[in-house]
Amino acid sequence: MAAISDSSSEGEFNEENSDDLSYSNLESIPECLVPSASCLISLQLNHNNITTLSQEIGHFKNLVSLDISNNGLTYISDEIITLKKLRNFTAKNNALDVSAIPKDFGQLISLECLNMSGNNFHCIPEQFTELTKLRRLYLGGNKIQNITAQVQELQCLEILYLGGNELTEIPAELGHLNNLTALILCDNKLQSLPPTLCQLRNLTSMSLHNNQLSTLPTEIVALKNLVELSLRNNPLVVKFVEDLVYDPPTLLELAGRVVKIKKIPYTTNDLPSTVVKYLDAAQRCVNPKCKGVYFTAKVEHVKFVDFCGKYRLPLLQYLCSPKCTSLPFPCTSSSDSDTDDEGVHKNKMQRVLLG
């Protein structure tokens, strides 16, 4: 048999170095494979009845690709970590949970693609965030309720598939995945998105359909490379909504607004440091016609904005007062006049709900 090279790729898989035992009614790895295990770089064991990936897997030292999907798999033995050349590991549609993943799973130093969709994970196993060469991670159709902040360690990640889970929020750290090109978050329970997603400069596709989103962060217009955006079946608002949340400003805030608007000078020699810090935290109203500021008392306002000439997006902005009328946001292109923004009809909303 031909010698196995470190540079073996999927294009080099052939009858001599690959074995397809899918749909073979297997309950374990056949012992007859062990003598020639080191010669294999691809092994397909999908659609069998293998509930335990036993220690025999450790004999396949040169495996580059392993598929053990659709087996009812509940356990992966520690010997999996000896497969230092493994680049593609597919174990979708099984019965795996966090306890089934070896604690040293992160030592699979060559792993680039991991597919464990359709299992029983309630969170992303910490070991997965140690796979620093991972480029594609598929965890759709699980029961994941939260995403660990450690996901930011996956700096090589290009595709993150988390559709069909139970996510209610996304951590800000997700915005640190600089190489991400596709983010799939459809079929969850998301009500909002972090503004840090605007840092995903290489993102070309984002799926958000079938969630509970009513608005999107204004920062999303910074995603210049985004060409696919799925928003259907979200409770996206159908008209401008003002005064959603507005608590009357305190006397401190009113005084602070006067100081900032009138540009009254102040220093720590005149005021306590806590007051100076408070005054320095003033935020400008986003309305170009308004010179006002706010500290904590603000009005949530939804503005519809053309995005890339394709979508009519409801973006959340903050105004200093309910009487403050906003103007359109800057955007990458505009095909509608400003007067259109004053009355959004249902036919306009069809552009938001594009899949």
Image (spheres, grey):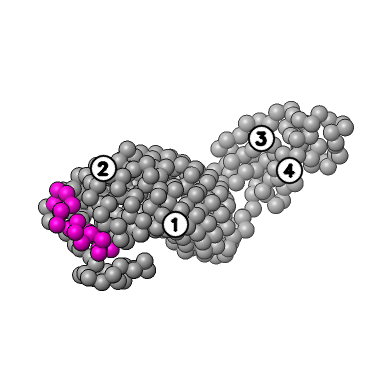
Q: Earlier in the sequence, mark 2 or mark 1?
A: 2
Q: Residue furthest left?
A: 25
For residue 133, the mark is 1
Q: Earlier in the sequence, mark 2 or mark 4?
A: 2
Amino acid identity at mark 1: Lys
For residue 3, the mark is none
Q: Earlier in the sequence, mark 4 or mark 1?
A: 1
Label 1 SS: loop
- Rounded to the nearest angstrom, the CA distance separating label 2 from label 1 is 24 Å
Residue 48 appears left or right of 225? left
For residue 296, the mark is 3
- Rounded to the nearest angstrom, the CA distance separating label 3 from label 2 is 51 Å
Q: Which residue is mark 4?
A: 292
Amino acid identity at mark 2: Tyr
- Comparing labels 3 and 2, the label whose residue is closer to the camera: 2
Q: Nearer the viewer, residue 58 or 326?
A: 58
- Rounded to the nearest angstrom, the CA distance separating label 4 from label 3 is 13 Å
Q: Which residue is mark 2?
A: 75
